[in-house]
């Protein structure tokens, strides 16, 4: 997935059984809808 804030690639991380999209460049965290 591409970060909507800075357009870099994001990684998927799991936190408390919830999958989050995390941008390693701008440290943005996004939830899937």
Image (tube, helix red, strand yellow):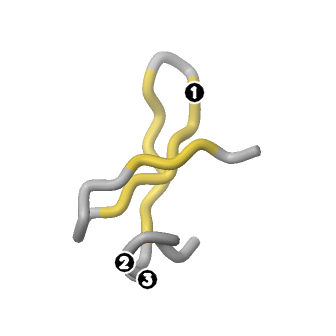
Quadrant the N terminus occupies = bottom right
Q: Secondary structure at mark 3?
A: loop
Q: Earlier in the sequence, mark 1 or mark 2?
A: 2
x 57%, y 37%: residue: 19
x 47%, y 34%: residue: 14
Q: Position of residue 33 (x, y in %)?
A: 76, 44
Query: Vertically, is 23 above or below 17?
Result: below
Q: Position of residue 22 (x, y in %)?
A: 40, 53
Q: Residues within 10 Å of mark 2 (few under 14, many from 20)?
A: few
Front residue (pair 28, 17): 28
Return the residue at label 3.
7
Figure quadrant of residue 10: bottom left
| Disc 1 + disc 3, Cβ < 8 Å | no
Return the residue at label 1.
18
Q: Residues within 10 Å of mark 1 (few under 14, many from 20)?
A: few
Q: Which mark is residue 6?
A: 2
Query: Vertically, is 8 above or below 1?
Result: below
Q: Position of residue 32 (x, y in %)?
A: 68, 47
Label 2, label 3: how many angstroms apart (C-alpha)?
A: 4 Å
Query: Vertically, is 21 above or below 17?
Result: below
> Can you tell which of label 1 and label 3 is closer to the viewer?
3
Q: Secondary structure at mark 1?
A: strand
| Disc 2 + disc 3, Cβ < 8 Å | yes
Figure quadrant of residue 27: bottom left
Tell me: 3 left or right of 6.
right
Q: Residue furthest top?
A: 16
Q: Secondary structure at mark 2?
A: loop
Q: Earlier in the sequence, mark 1 or mark 3?
A: 3
């Amino acid at each position: 997935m591409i970060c909507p804030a800075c357009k870099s690639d994001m990684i998927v991380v799991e936190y408390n059984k919830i999958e989050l999209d995390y941008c390693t460049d701008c440290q943005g965290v996004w939830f899937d809808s």
